């Protein structure tokens, strides 16, 4: 299948926060196979974030500290965590390589799937690197490694899951939210799985350990099987269930294709995913190569998440904020702060992103930035617990209009508005929405690029 | 007074239907359902965010166990505002005490839920969504109330929250309340040039989009513009003459009182007072915050009463959890479980102490054991005050309590 401009835009909007206009022109007419080769590369992952190089101080050592020292330590930790967040967001904004962007986009998806909040920045970074590493790898590796991440074990209370007093939280969420989905296991299965996970924990260096003394060695009954299962066995059994492939494929479909699942397409995907032994890249390739992915009903029908909105806007318009705090504040106000998911179920997404205030904010952010205005502090009060040191004055940003304009260099004056609106808005434009060509190319371009952000359609992808 | 108010509403109706941008289908419905939908009853929810220490809010000063577990934080009998022979209010709560004396306050003790969660976020979620501790709901209890009321078309401003972000509590499946920091600013932001341009277009064209999310976005925008205009106009009708304390919290309550008196159709008002996460040096911090709360609340009630609106207004105060019974090593308290809830209204069935405090000698790993599920309180409000069906909204039946 040969891809036209519109189809290419759709593909890259969904997978890599858009595509520069120039690349769009070059790839026009390429086949899906050729394009996907540029999007998915089997590279050895080495893009680990390493902005927090050493484990934080251990709980034992923390006990020795004075209250003042503890408070300082907390503040430093929060600072580092915020740095990590901003580092990730800025990485996605500045990164140019499609395979890397696709991986990060998948990583944000998995971050919502394996949602986890961790205050210790070293452990948060470790968790984040794990989901990034396997984002387009194998779901089995991803599941096994995330389940053994100290951040996750801590978040789901598995440090308290002991032979004498099992804590079911971890086992429950692994099945309900990470793999099988509701209705595909019983409360008894949870109890038995929890016993199999007893002893899973981590040491002060942030390494996974199995505490033998706390592990329940007795027999378990799990999903119809009997045995002296440990945690690994439970995960293996879960992956043998077709329901797991179905549950994950469905979630991927809803996130990347449409909220309305075509059950025939899903069945096809889910079987393929299962037979490929949970190869995520193959699953994505199958979707992106299918004809139905490019059907009109599947285009421009998803509401951008705050991260999609922010990253894609800043990439496309060549925007950079003056202060790091700006990245954090906007995430928080728009309702999605990376590393701070609302709970273990992640961000519900879709229509839940939008209410009166977030919609007005989404319309206002580009307006303020592009008209080189400033959002006043009283409108942008800091959320509790996220107030940075120093005084935050304003949300100031730089827009590199020249770079943006240059991408359109070869477009003729008379086609300029048409090209830019097709590039920025997935759906047909209200007639007469853009002003007549004024005779001044730069002015027309800027006015159009600005006005288009004000359309609710700009929130779709 | 009354006449001019009615007249205003009539004229504002005309201007609402002439609103910029608002597409046709919204316009036609605006006039139709405006009067029929409100019950006249107002519910104000105050959230003491961060986890207020209920045990130092309503203090059992006869209980030795209290002073044993709180050697530095325990408040002495002489400092308390005594309610009876056993209990006293935190010295910061002079305002609340006055409401108590007039029979306008009902204190429900030991409110919580099974398997309490000690994370702020999670526990707040549970209170907002009214879910079980191991359940994750994406809608809030008041959001579902809005859903149930508004089958075809409903307005976001039926529930408003004074904040920049909308709480889960006010998010329904089909309709969400509005988070507003400043009504004037919101109104101004709906008057931008591009939005006007859209209006010109849609005035000429009826629209309905096949693309569901696109339809949803345009509809939300139209509703926001229409609600912003509605709120803006109502916010200018009545200016309260009552003197309120000079705090942001009090200003928010004042605004609510003004809006209520303007004859607004908003039913639910949601405000939050943050800062109760007192792990360190709790005494001064909490007392100050409770004073902000109590003094503002007293002014609010007096204002409502003066204008004849108190009988139709009920005020509920809660916090996502109470705190541990035993104080920590930093003269503070850590996250706990059950807590007290305050109900303020003119015609309470059982003013004063609704029930007794949880037993301090019988704790669950150092935490209070709840005796009242918060959803019994919600159910009571939904059934008796908002005259709805709590079973539908909460997903299962919770018996009503006899406080209203």
Image (tube, coloured by chain):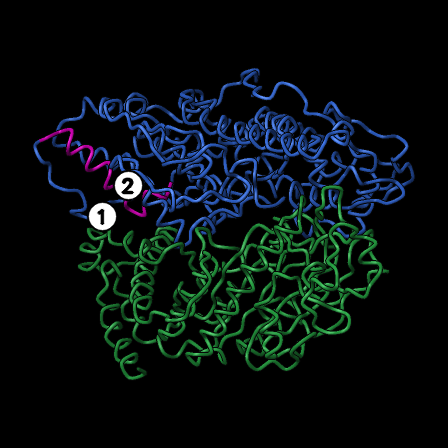
Q: Which residue is drawn at the image coordinates 28% and 54% (left, top)?
A: B190
Q: Position of residue B269 (x, y in %)?
A: 47, 65
Q: Which residue is mark 1?
A: B194
Q: Residue furthest left?
A: A439
Residue A367 disc label: 2
Position of residue B171 measured from the top left corner of the image (x, y, whole percent): 49, 58
Query: Does residue A12 show up?
Result: yes
Element carrying mark 1: helix
- Residue at image position (33%, 66%) is B235
Chain that appears blue: A
- The image quadrant of residue B104 is bottom right
Q: Position of residue B194 (x, y in %)?
A: 22, 48
The chain letter under disc 2 is: A
From the viewer's perspective, is the residue at label 2 or at label 1 nearer?
2
Q: Whole-Å distance between the Cαs marked 2 and 1?
A: 10 Å
Task: Please report the bounds of the magenta region as a residue range.
Answer: A440-461
């Amino acid at each position: 299948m040969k891809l036209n401009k519109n189809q290419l835009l759709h593909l890259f909007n969904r997978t890599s926060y858009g595509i520069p206009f120039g690349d769009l022109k070059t790839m026009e007419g390429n086949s899906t196979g050729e394009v996907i080769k540029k999007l998915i590369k089997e590279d050895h992952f080495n893009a680990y974030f390493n902005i927090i190089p050493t484990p934080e101080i251990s709980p034992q050592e923390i006990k020795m500290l004075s209250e003042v020292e503890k408070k300082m330590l907390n503040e430093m930790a929060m600072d580092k965590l915020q740095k990590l967040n901003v580092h990730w967001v800025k990485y996605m904004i500045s990164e140019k390589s499609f395979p890397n962007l696709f991986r990060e986009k998948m990583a944000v998806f998995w971050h919502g799937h394996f949602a986890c909040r961790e205050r210790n920045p070293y452990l948060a970074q470790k968790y984040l690197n794990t989901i990034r590493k396997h984002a387009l790898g194998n779901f089995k590796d991803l599941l096994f490694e995330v389940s053994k991440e100290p951040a996750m074990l801590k978040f789901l209370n598995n440090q308290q899951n002991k032979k004498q007093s099992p804590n079911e939280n971890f086992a429950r969420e692994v099945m309900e939210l990470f793999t099988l989905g509701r209705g595909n296991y019983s409360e008894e299965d949870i109890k038995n799985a929890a016993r199999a996970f007893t002893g899973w924990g981590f040491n002060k260096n942030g390494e996974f350990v199995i505490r033998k003394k706390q592990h329940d060695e007795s027999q378990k009954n799990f999903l119809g099987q009997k045995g002296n299962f440990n945690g690994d066995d439970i995960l293996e059994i879960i992956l043998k269930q077709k329901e797991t492939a179905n549950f994950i494929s469905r979630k991927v479909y809803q996130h990347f294709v449409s909220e309305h699942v075509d059950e025939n397409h899903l069945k096809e995907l889910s079987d393929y995913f299962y037979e490929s032994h949970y190869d995520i890249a193959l699953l994505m390739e199958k979707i992106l190569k299918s004809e139905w992915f490019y059907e009109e009903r599947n285009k421009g029908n998803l509401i951008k998440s705050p991260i999609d909105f922010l990253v894609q806007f800043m990439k496309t318009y060549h925007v950079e904020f003056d202060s790091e705090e700006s990245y954090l504040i906007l995430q928080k106000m728009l309702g999605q702060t990376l590393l701070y998911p609302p709970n273990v179920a992640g961000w519900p997404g879709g229509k839940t992103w939008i209410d009166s205030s977030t919609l007005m904010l989404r319309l206002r952010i580009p307006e303020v930035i592009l008209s080189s205005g400033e959002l006043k502090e009283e409108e942008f009060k800091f959320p509790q617990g996220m107030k940075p040191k120093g005084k935050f004055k304003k949300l100031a940003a730089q827009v590199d209009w020249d770079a943006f304009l240059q991408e359109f260099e070869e477009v003729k004056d008379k086609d300029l508005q048409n090209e830019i609106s097709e590039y920025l808005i997935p759906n047909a434009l209200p007639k007469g929405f853009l002003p007549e060509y004024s005779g001044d190319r730069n002015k027309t371009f800027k006015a159009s690029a600005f006005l288009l952000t004000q359309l609710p359609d700009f929130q779709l992808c | 007074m009354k006449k001019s108010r009615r007249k205003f509403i009539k004229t504002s109706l005309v201007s609402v239907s002439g609103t910029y941008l608002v597409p046709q289908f919204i316009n036609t419905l605006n006039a139709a359902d405006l009067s029929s939908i409100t019950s006249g009853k107002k519910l104000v929810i105050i959230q003491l965010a961060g986890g207020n220490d209920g045990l130092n809010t309503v203090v059992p000063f006869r209980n030795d166990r209290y002073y044993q577990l709180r050697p530095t934080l325990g408040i002495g009998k002489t400092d308390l505002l005594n309610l009876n022979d056993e209990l006293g209010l935190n010295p910061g709560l002079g305002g609340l005490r006055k409401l108590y004396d007039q029979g306008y306050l009902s204190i429900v003790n030991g409110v919580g839920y099974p398997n309490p969660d000690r994370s702020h976020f999670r526990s707040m979620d549970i209170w907002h969504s009214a879910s079980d501790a191991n359940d994750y709901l994406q809608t809030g209890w008041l959001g579902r109330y809005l859903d149930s009321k508004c089958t075809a078309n409903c307005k976001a401003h039926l529930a408003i929250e004074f904040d920049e972000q909308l709480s889960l509590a006010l998010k329904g499946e089909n309709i969400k309340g509005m988070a507003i920091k400043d009504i004037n600013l919101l109104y101004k932001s709906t008057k931008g040039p591009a939005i006007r341009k859209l209006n010109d277009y849609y005035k000429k064209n009826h629209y309905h989009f096949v693309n569901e999310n696109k339809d949803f976005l345009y509809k939300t925008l139209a509703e926001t513009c229409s609600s912003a205009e509605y709120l803006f106009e109502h916010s200018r009708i009545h200016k309260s003459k009552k003197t309120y304390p000079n705090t942001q919290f009090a200003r928010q309550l004042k605004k609510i009182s003004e809006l209520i008196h303007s004859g607004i159709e908003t039913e639910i008002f949601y405000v939050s007072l943050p800062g109760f996460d007192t792990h360190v040096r709790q005494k001064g911090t909490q007392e100050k915050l409770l004073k902000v709360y109590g003094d503002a609340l007293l002014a609010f009630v007096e204002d409502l009463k003066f204008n004849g609106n108190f009988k139709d207004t009920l005020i509920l105060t809660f916090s996502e959890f109470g705190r541990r019974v035993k104080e920590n090593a930093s003269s503070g308290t850590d996250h706990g479980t059950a807590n007290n809830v305050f109900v303020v209204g003119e015609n309470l069935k059982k003013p004063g102490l609704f029930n007794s405090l949880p037993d301090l000698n019988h704790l669950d790993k150092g935490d209070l054991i709840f005796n009242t599920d918060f959803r019994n309180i919600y159910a009571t409000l939904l059934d008796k005050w908002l005259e709805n069906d709590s079973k539908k909204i909460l997903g299962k039946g919770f018996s009503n309590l006899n406080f209203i």
